[in-house]
Image (tube, rainbow, N blue to C red):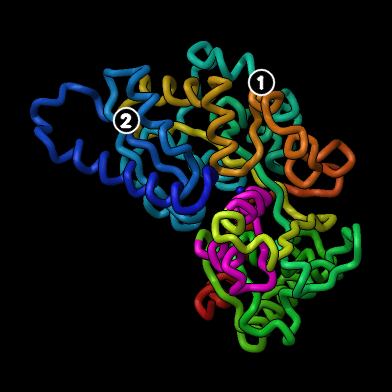
């Protein structure tokens, strides 16, 4: 994987939360609207989207909750949510566990009309049945690539390089101790280490995984990275960090915050996408324990209204799967291969795969590395 400019975004997000809380407490017995519970990433929806949806569908009252990454979302799914927005690899796990409802595409005319057809040919899973049935359960919301965001005034990288070792080396270089950021996220952190070492981000090879674990443990001890997700954007914009792993959408957010802070003359923030890195698709799904299935379909379809999709991708900074919204974007964004990879770039990127074997091996590494993180 966030977007209408820094302070406004934070105030607006807090405003949404406080308004929703107030609406929940104020005369709940007088409110005949049916609750619709959305569980989404933090900073991942335009500030006015919920209000617009409730205006378009006055029979619903939205309860909006957020999570920071897939792994913190997963254990909370015993609670009842009507729409969740996991990444594609977590979707495949939830499908294996029979935790998602199938979608009624007759109730999603906007998705039928505007979803980029490329999402029908993505290899989401090594499991053929899950791969072929993915879009029966999950609709692309936004997508991104994983690369390095860095201040070119402080970090010297070869021009136009896509070599993973040349790009990721800064994150493991002791000369940048205390100056780099790492996501506190299992697949992204392990994926960066594997990509740097020249391995697939989906490897199951024991020796390769062990090398990645040792690399991350060494990084923790000798490079002392700043950890987190949303907080890293602010630290990069303020000049506290020289480089960080980043979703492509975060680069756009950071650029806006640099302008807002008046630091455009001091920071030269760039984003580079290594060959063999990850591209990630966050997808809207309806859990099996959802209580408002009709409202969930209405919400998913609403998010594919072109003006709503445009506003969201501009706010968040991530790439839209909505063809009409993309046509309305600034061509500098819509034609940037880091944000909207072309076919040649996609050939050298991977989505994360998941299976019981993947989950077991990667979670074992994360227990070792994540605990020390």
Relative vertical location of residue 20 with respect to residue 266 in this rendering, above or below: above
Q: Residue at x 40, y 48 (%)?
A: 66
Compare residues 308 and 203 and report the one nearer the observer: 308
Can you give x and y, in whole percent of width and height, for residue 165 in the image? Answer: 85, 70
Residue 253 lies in magenta, yes or no? yes
| Residue 80 x %, y % | 32, 40
Along the line of sight, which residue is nearer the eye, 242 or 83?
Answer: 242
- The boundaries of the magenta stretch are 231-256
Which x, y percent locates residue 316? 55, 43
Mark 1: give few (<14), some (14-19) or many (20+) Cα within 10 Å. Answer: some
Q: Is residue 279 visible?
A: yes
Q: Nearer the viewer, residue 96 or 266?
A: 266
Q: Earlier in the sequence, mark 1 or mark 2?
A: 2
Q: Gap in Å between the C-alphas at discs 1 and 2? A: 27 Å
Identify the secondary structure beneath mark 2: strand
Residue 206 is left or right of residue 167, and the answer is left
Task: Please give the label number shown on residue 54.
Answer: none
Residue in view at x 58 percent, y 21 percent:
306
Residue at 61% across / 82% down in the picture?
Answer: 178
Name the residue at 50% across, 26% down.
Answer: 303
Residue labelled with disc 2:
36
Residue 299 placement, left or right of 279: left
Res. 324 mark: 1
Q: Is residue 141 above or below residue 351?
A: above
């Amino acid at each position: 994987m966030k977007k209408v400019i820094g302070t406004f975004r934070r105030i607006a997000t807090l405003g949404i939360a406080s308004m929703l809380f107030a609406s929940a407490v104020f005369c709940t017995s007088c409110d005949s609207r049916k609750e619709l519970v959305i569980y989404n990433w933090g900073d991942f929806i335009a500030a006015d989207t919920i209000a617009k949806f409730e205006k378009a569908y006055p029979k619903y009252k939205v309860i909006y909750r957020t999570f920071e990454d897939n792994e913190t979302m997963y254990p909370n799914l015993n609670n009842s949510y009507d729409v969740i927005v996991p990444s594609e690899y977590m979707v495949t796990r939830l499908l294996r566990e029979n935790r998602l409802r199938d979608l009624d595409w007759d109730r999603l005319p906007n998705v039928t009309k505007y979803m980029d057809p490329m999402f029908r040919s993505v290899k989401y899973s090594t499991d053929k049945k899950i791969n072929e049935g993915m879009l029966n359960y999950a609709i692309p919301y936004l997508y991104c690539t994983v690369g390095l965001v860095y201040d070119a005034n402080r970090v010297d990288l070869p021009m136009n390089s896509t070599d993973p070792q040349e790009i990721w080396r800064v994150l493991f270089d002791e000369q940048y101790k205390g100056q780099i950021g790492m996501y506190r996220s299992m697949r992204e952190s392990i994926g960066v280490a594997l990509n740097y070492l020249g391995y697939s981000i989906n490897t199951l090879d024991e020796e390769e995984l062990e090398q990645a674990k040792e690399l991350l443990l060494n990084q923790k001890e000798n490079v002392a990275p700043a950890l987190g997700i949303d907080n890293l954007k602010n630290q990069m914009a303020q000049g506290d960090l020289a480089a960080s792993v980043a979703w492509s959408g975060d680069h756009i957010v950071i650029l806006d915050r640099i302008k807002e802070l008046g630091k455009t003359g001091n920071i030269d923030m760039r984003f580079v996408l290594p060959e063999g890195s990850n591209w990630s698709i966050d997808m809207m799904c309806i859990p099996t324990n959802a209580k408002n299935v009709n409202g969930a379909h209405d919400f998913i379809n609403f998010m594919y209204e072109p003006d709503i999709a445009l506003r969201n991708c501009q706010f968040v900074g991530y790439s839209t799967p909505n063809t009409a919204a993309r046509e309305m974007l600034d061509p500098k964004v819509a034609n940037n291969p880091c944000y909207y990879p072309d076919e040649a770039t996609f050939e050298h990127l991977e989505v994360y795969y998941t299976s019981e074997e993947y989950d077991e091996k990667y979670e074992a590494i994360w227990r070792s590395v994540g605990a020390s993180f």
